[in-house]
């Protein structure tokens, strides 16, 4: 019995180590948009949340630092003079937009949005699909189950590992959009938050398809925009790719709604008198000691 237990533990450890590489990298990419949302939209009052996110970000960055460095060098090598010209034009457009926005938002409660803010927002949108993308890694779980491991290894090692991995990734997506919606409300755009979420779900579904099936990355928006655009246009008119995107959109929308309701309920429950995670939703009164 002891020998069998040791064999199970050894096999389980080997499986966990085997999944470690892609899970660490995908978790890092999933948490990046949440960290950006702290800067762009809302800084949570909960120190546990802030430190937890940056701890995960740092813990997943260190093992993949060499990969991040290689990716950065690759980006510099792929960006040609033509792309630099387009980036310069985009920068000029953003600067003009910044000046125009500054004149409009002198009395705005959110202040003016700088060029750096817009760059961060573009990075946020580009990296956001990486958060729910972790759900597609269920294919690795299916392959591990088919490998014929013991039911104990699958139940006590594989499934908990994948559950934690997927919950962390998708919850990053949920919190990022919640903070975005709060930011839009402060900007007086509350009636557009639902539409913005649906649009982002649609873009995310397209991004997940391109990442899982076409193997594009977030930085291909800069390095290979022409190839990326052609691929998107070809896939949108294809029956199978379009169907996959629709199914992905539905799954993301339903799961997001469920996770959002649970998250907001926990935020409201922790309100003493204001939520440690963020502001109380409009129309809701803060929790008091007399409330159940």
Image (tube, rainbow, N blue to C red):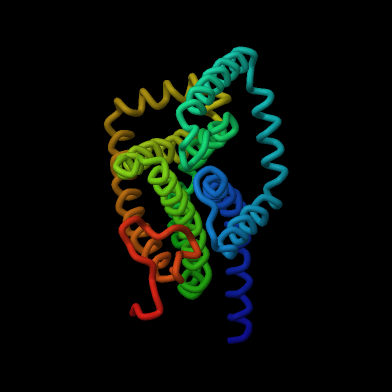
In the image, 111 versus 216, the foreground residue is 111
The reply to whether residue 18 is in sight is no
Query: Residue 272: image x %, image y %?
Result: 46, 71
**Residue sitting at 56 percent across and 35 percent down?**
117
Figure quadrant of residue 282: bottom left
In the image, 118 versus 18, the foreground residue is 118
Query: Residue 65: image x %, image y %?
Result: 71, 45
Above or below: residue 165 compared with residue 252: below
Above or below: residue 50 compared with residue 212: below
Above or below: residue 89 compared with residue 20: above
Figure quadrant of residue 260: bottom left
In the image, 270 versus 137, the foreground residue is 270
**Residue sitting at 50 percent across and 36 percent down?**
126
**Residue sitting at 62 percent across and 60 percent down?**
51
Residue lying at the far front of the rendered structure: 107
The reply to whether residue 182 is in sight is yes
Query: Residue 112: image x %, image y %?
Result: 52, 34
Residue lying at the far bottom of the rendered structure: 1
In screen coordinates, is 39 left or right of 110?
right
In screen coordinates, is 262 left or right of 224?
left
Placement of the C terminus among the 4 image quadrants: bottom left
State how many labels appear. Answer: 0
**Residue sitting at 48 percent across and 48 percent down?**
131
Placement of the N terminus among the 4 image quadrants: bottom right
Query: Residue 207: image x %, image y %?
Result: 43, 37
């Amino acid at each position: 019995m002891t020998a069998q237990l040791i064999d199970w533990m050894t096999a389980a450890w080997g499986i966990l180590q085997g999944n470690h590489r892609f899970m660490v990298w995908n978790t890092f990419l999933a948490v990046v948009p949440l960290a950006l949302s702290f800067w762009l939209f809302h800084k949570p009052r909960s120190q546990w949340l802030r430190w937890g996110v940056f701890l995960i970000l740092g813990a997943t960055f260190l093992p993949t630092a060499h990969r991040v460095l290689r990716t950065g060098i690759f980006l510099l090598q792929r960006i040609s003079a033509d792309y630099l010209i387009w980036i310069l034009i985009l920068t000029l457009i953003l600067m003009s937009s910044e000046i125009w926005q500054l004149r409009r938002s002198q009395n705005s409660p959110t202040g003016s949005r700088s060029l750096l803010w817009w760059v961060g927002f573009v990075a946020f949108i580009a990296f956001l699909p990486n958060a729910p993308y972790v759900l597609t890694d269920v294919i690795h779980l299916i392959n591990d189950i088919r490998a014929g491991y013991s039911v104990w290894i699958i139940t006590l090692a594989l499934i908990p590992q994948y559950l934690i991995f997927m919950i962390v990734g998708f919850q990053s997506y949920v919190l990022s959009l919640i903070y975005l919606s709060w930011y839009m409300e402060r900007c007086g755009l509350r009636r557009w938050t639902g539409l913005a979420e649906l649009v982002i779900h649609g873009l995310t579904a397209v991004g997940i398809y391109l990442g899982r099936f076409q193997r594009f990355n977030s930085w291909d928006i800069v390095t290979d925009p022409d190839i990326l655009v052609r691929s998107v246009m070809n896939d949108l008119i294809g029956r199978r790719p379009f169907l996959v995107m629709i199914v992905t959109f539905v799954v993301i929308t339903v799961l997001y709604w469920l996770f959002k309701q649970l998250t907001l309920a926990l935020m409201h429950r922790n309100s003493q008198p204001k939520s440690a995670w963020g502001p109380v939703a409009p129309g809701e009164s803060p929790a008091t000691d007399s409330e159940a």
